[in-house]
Image (tube, rainbow, N blue to C red):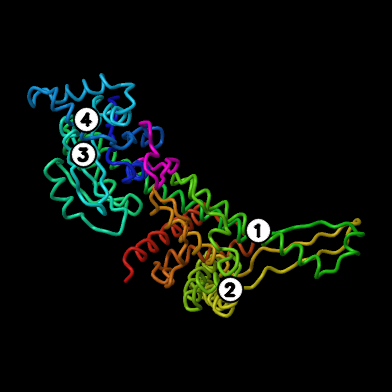
């Protein structure tokens, strides 16, 4: 197998180089700091998916004395034909020279055949220092593109566009923290046009990354569906001796079981979040609940969460009718069709009525205390009997997935889960609504789903992700 393309990310100190590397390599372990000189040694970061390295990014120190370097190069070059060799001679001669440590680290991967990604801060003016840097890079003869990554509030991007266009084959604006995924792919395709040997591997890389992203969404849907089934069907159980039972009132027992049930559900939601974050290679997101402010008004069981993510009575009625009709169809099957569809109709009406009348209030699971037998009695709390609980979990899970799937690995801010201001499930197709409601009904009744129903449920969860993604990206 041929070696994957290598790109060295170069530029001034503290101009977003490490952020670009973190985003394009999907690695949130790369250190990013505001003070100059954070990167002192070149470091390679492969973009690896399923054990296959698609390309390699090299994070480098920033230029420190570009005009001094350029003076040396010009003094030792005879003609344009020897410029690449002159750059190599500079690095060879100045290895170990403390004055040019950063420049030698920066230029070494270019001498070894890496392509150039030159990063500038569009919020600072163009200067002679930058021109010296770009001249040195042009002397290497390597394929190159430039990225304008504005960090501050000022905007000199027009001036930068004109200057960079004289030195680089491709010039793009690129916000390493906020650039959408398609911009990542666009950069890879652009590099493929600059170096014929890279065209095929980078075209394959873009296809591979796109397919991997689609698989991540499908895998996320499976994770969400499994969590929903577990949380909807979960029962907190406790067995007491006669002495324990006599020393505790039903209210005290209910309070203990309820608190343990709540704690389990919160922890299960946290596990789901971490599973999705790791699936997208986000290993270090700052997401403690206190930092996310999801303890009070944004807690799983808060009124705010219910009002934000619960669905309307009308939605529940239509989804409940569809799910009830599916269940009622089994009556028609048993009677070999002699009921003339009455089973599906009755089932649909019962499902719609139940979800309609109970849809606006969040009902807690009931406490069930068994009779004392052989010196023991068992108490259970759960499973949940309210479909709205499932929709609250689903809404929060899909919203979290959306933020994670669109979050670049250069992001270091706290994860801000901004709730939706419109219930996107209203736009979900009817078959997906029915599949979700049927799954919730099965969980509430402690009934298992067959293979087809499980697959339909996962597909419906994934379709809800697609629907939410479309709404978030196209909302006014």
Q: Is residue 40 magenta?
A: yes
Q: Is residue 185 magenta?
A: no
| Residue numbers of the magenta segment | 24-42
Tell me which numbered mark, 2 or 4, is placed earlier along the sequence.
4
Instruction: Give neighbour class at mark 3: few <14, some 14-19, many 20+ (Cα, 10 Å).
Output: many
Q: State the residue position of label 3.
A: 191
Distance CA(mark 2)–CA(mark 3): 51 Å
Q: Residue at x 19, y 30 (%)?
A: 197
Tell me which numbered mark, 3 or 1, is placed earlier along the sequence.
3
Q: Is residue 192 visible?
A: no
Q: State the residue position of label 1.
A: 234
Distance CA(mark 3)–CA(mark 1): 52 Å
Residue 247 lies in quadrant: bottom right
Distance CA(mark 1)–CA(mark 4): 68 Å
Q: Quadrant of the C terminus?
A: bottom left
Q: Please give left or right for residue 379 compared with residue 342 in the image.
A: right
Q: Residue at x 88, y 57 (%)?
A: 241
Q: State the residue position of label 2.
A: 303
In this rendering, the label closer to the viewer, 4 or 3: 4
Specify the label residue 69 is tagged with. 4
Instruction: Give neighbour class at mark 2: few <14, some 14-19, many 20+ (Cα, 10 Å).
Output: few
């Amino acid at each position: 197998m041929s070696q994957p393309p290598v790109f060295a990310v170069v530029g001034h100190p503290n101009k977003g180089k490490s952020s670009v590397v973190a985003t394009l390599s999907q690695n949130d372990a790369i250190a990013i700091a505001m003070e100059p000189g954070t990167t002192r040694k070149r470091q390679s970061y492969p973009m690896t998916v399923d054990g296959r390295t698609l390309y390699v990014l090299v994070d480098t120190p920033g230029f420190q004395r570009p005009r001094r370097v350029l003076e040396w190069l010009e003094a030792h070059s005879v003609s344009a034909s020897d410029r690449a060799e002159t750059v190599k001679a500079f690095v060879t001669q100045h290895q170990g020279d403390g004055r040019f440590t950063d420049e030698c680290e920066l230029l070494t991967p270019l001498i070894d055949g890496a392509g150039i990604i030159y990063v500038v801060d569009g919020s600072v003016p163009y200067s002679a220092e930058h021109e010296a840097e770009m001249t040195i890079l042009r002397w290497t003869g390597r394929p190159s593109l430039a990225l304008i990554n504005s960090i501050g509030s000022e905007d000199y991007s027009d001036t930068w566009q004109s200057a960079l266009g004289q030195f680089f084959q491709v010039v793009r604006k690129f916000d390493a923290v906020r650039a959408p995924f398609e911009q990542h792919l666009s950069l890879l395709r652009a590099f493929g046009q600059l170096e014929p040997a890279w065209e095929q591997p980078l075209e394959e890389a873009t296809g591979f990354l796109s397919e991997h992203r689609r698989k991540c969404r499908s895998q996320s849907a499976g994770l969400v569906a499994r969590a929903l089934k577990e949380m909807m069907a979960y029962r907190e159980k406790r067995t007491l001796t006669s002495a324990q039972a006599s020393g505790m009132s039903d209210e005290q027992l209910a309070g203990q079981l309820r608190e343990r049930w709540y704690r389990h559900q919160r922890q299960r939601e946290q596990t789901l979040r971490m599973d999705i974050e790791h699936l997208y290679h986000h290993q270090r997101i700052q997401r403690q609940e206190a930092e996310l402010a999801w303890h009070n008004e944004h807690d799983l069981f808060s009124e705010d969460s219910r009002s934000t993510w619960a669905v309307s009575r009308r939605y529940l009625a239509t989804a409940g009718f569809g799910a009830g009709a599916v269940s009622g169809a089994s009556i028609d099957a048993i009677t070999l069709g002699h009921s003339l569809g009455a089973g599906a109709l009755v089932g649909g009406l019962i499902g719609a009525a139940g979800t309609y009348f109970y849809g606006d209030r969040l009902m807690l699971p009931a406490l069930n205390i068994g009779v004392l037998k052989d010196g023991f009695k068992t108490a259970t709390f759960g499973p949940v009997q309210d479909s709205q609980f499932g929709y609250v979990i689903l809404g929060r899970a899909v919203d979290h997935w959306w933020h994670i799937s669109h979050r670049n690995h250069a992001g270091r801010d706290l994860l801000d889960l901004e709730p939706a201001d419109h219930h996107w499930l209203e736009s979900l197709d009817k078959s997906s609504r029915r599949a979700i409601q049927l799954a919730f009904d099965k969980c509430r009744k402690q009934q298992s789903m067959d293979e087809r129903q499980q697959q339909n449920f996962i597909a419906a969860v994934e379709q809800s992700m697609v629907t939410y993604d479309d709404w978030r990206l196209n909302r006014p």
